[in-house]
């Protein structure tokens, strides 16, 4: 990393479904300041973000701005709706113009992407994917998000990666319909924290023991996701984090085993463990937009 990057002051905005975390960091990923705004309506939330960024700009300023947002997002630079949230189940946010409003205010280089892609870029710069151009970052919490990095860039097409909604081969004997309102038994509908709560009919899943039968379904589903990732993008590493997995450390080795069983020798995987925990923990999200913005300098 260059001296310019090390001395840079980067503003990052991680816009989540319940809270928005704003950070000011240097080029080495050291967080200098951090503030939170509750995610309510677009006007309330973005006004709160602007107040924080305005204060930082008035102090010593910042060299670039990164915004990593919940989605789905319009990321097509040729689209009139670029930078907005086209449609979402979150009340009031469908059509919200996030990027244009914030980036147009400060006149610095900027980056805009999904929150999970941002976390992936942070892991690539400072975390467990350093030195890799091809890897995946999976977060399993309230929902399931996938940041897929190929040749050093986030995968793009007509939209961004939404592998959390991939349909999977079900575990034998499992006929539970799934939680997802769109696809029923997709990855998110079977393996997310919301899905586990719905399946078990309980709000608190933190006390579930490692031998609870529900984990067999979760591991099988995430292994199917990893199977597809290996066949489509051949990532050198698949980082899986989020509250569901972090609270159950036995899951990662089980997913690795089930992945290799599922591939059944068709692909020659690296000898090293391919399914791993993220290196940054809960810092990956807030540092995501910072990593994105640094790439613009």
Image (spheres, rainbow, N blue to C red):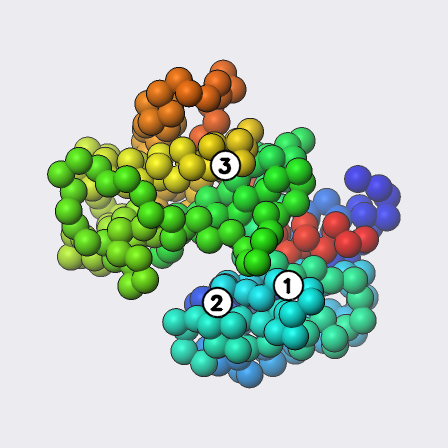
Question: Residue at left 72%, top 45%?
Answer: 28
Question: Residue at left 55%, top 77%?
Answer: 96
Q: Is residue 66 visible?
A: yes
25 or 261, nearer to the observer: 261
Determine crowd level at label 1: few under 14, some 14-19, many 20+ residues with C-alpha closer than 10 A: some
Q: Is residue 111 left or right of residue 8?
A: left
> Mark 3 or mark 2, which has the lower sequence index?
2
Relative to 16, is 196 above or below? above
Label 2 belongs to which residue?
Answer: 19
Relative to 82, is 115 above or below? above
Q: Is residue 263 left or right of residue 125?
A: left
Inter-mark Cα distance, 3 to 2: 33 Å
Dot 1: what SS?
loop
Label 1 belongs to which residue?
Answer: 76
> Mark 3 or mark 1, which has the lower sequence index?
1
> Dividing the picture into quarters, in which one does residue 45 lie?
bottom right
Give percent across and percent down for residue 170: 24, 41
Residue 232's tag is 3
29 or 228, nearer to the observer: 228
Determine crowd level at label 3: few under 14, some 14-19, many 20+ residues with C-alpha closer than 10 A: few
Dot 2: what SS?
strand
Name the quarter where the N terminus is drawn. top right
């Amino acid at each position: 990393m260059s001296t310019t990057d090390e001395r840079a002051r980067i503003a990052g905005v991680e816009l989540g479904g319940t809270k928005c975390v704003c950070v000011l960091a240097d080029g080495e990923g050291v967080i200098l300041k951090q503030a939170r705004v509750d995610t309510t309506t677009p006007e309330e939330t973005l006004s709160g973000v602007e107040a924080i960024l305005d204060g930082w700009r008035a102090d010593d300023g910042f060299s670039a701005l990164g915004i990593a947002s919940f989605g789905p997002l319009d990321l097509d630079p040729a689209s009139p709706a670029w930078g907005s949230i086209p449609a979402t189940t979150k009340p009031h946010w469908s059509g919200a113009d996030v990027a244009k409003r914030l980036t147009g205010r400060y006149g610095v280089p900027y980056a805009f992407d999904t929150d999970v892609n941002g976390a992936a870029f942070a892991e690539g710069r400072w975390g467990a994917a350093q030195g890799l151009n091809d890897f995946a970052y999976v977060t399993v919490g309230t929902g399931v998000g996938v940041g897929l990095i190929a040749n050093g860039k986030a995968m793009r097409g007509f939209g961004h990666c939404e592998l959390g909604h991939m349909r999977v081969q079900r575990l034998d004997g499992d006929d539970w319909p799934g939680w997802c309102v769109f696809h029923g038994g997709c990855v998110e509908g079977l393996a997310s924290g919301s899905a586990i709560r719905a399946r078990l009919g309980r709000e608190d899943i933190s006390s579930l023991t490692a031998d609870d039968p529900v984990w067999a379904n979760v591991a099988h589903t995430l292994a199917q996701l990893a199977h597809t990732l290996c066949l489509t993008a051949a990532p050198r590493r698949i980082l899986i984090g989020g509250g569901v997995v972090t609270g159950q450390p036995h899951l990662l080795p089980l997913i690795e085993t089930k992945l290799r069983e599922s591939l059944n020798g068709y692909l020659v995987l690296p000898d090293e463990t391919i399914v791993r925990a993220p290196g940054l923990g809960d810092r990956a999200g807030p540092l995501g937009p910072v990593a994105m913005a640094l790439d613009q300098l």
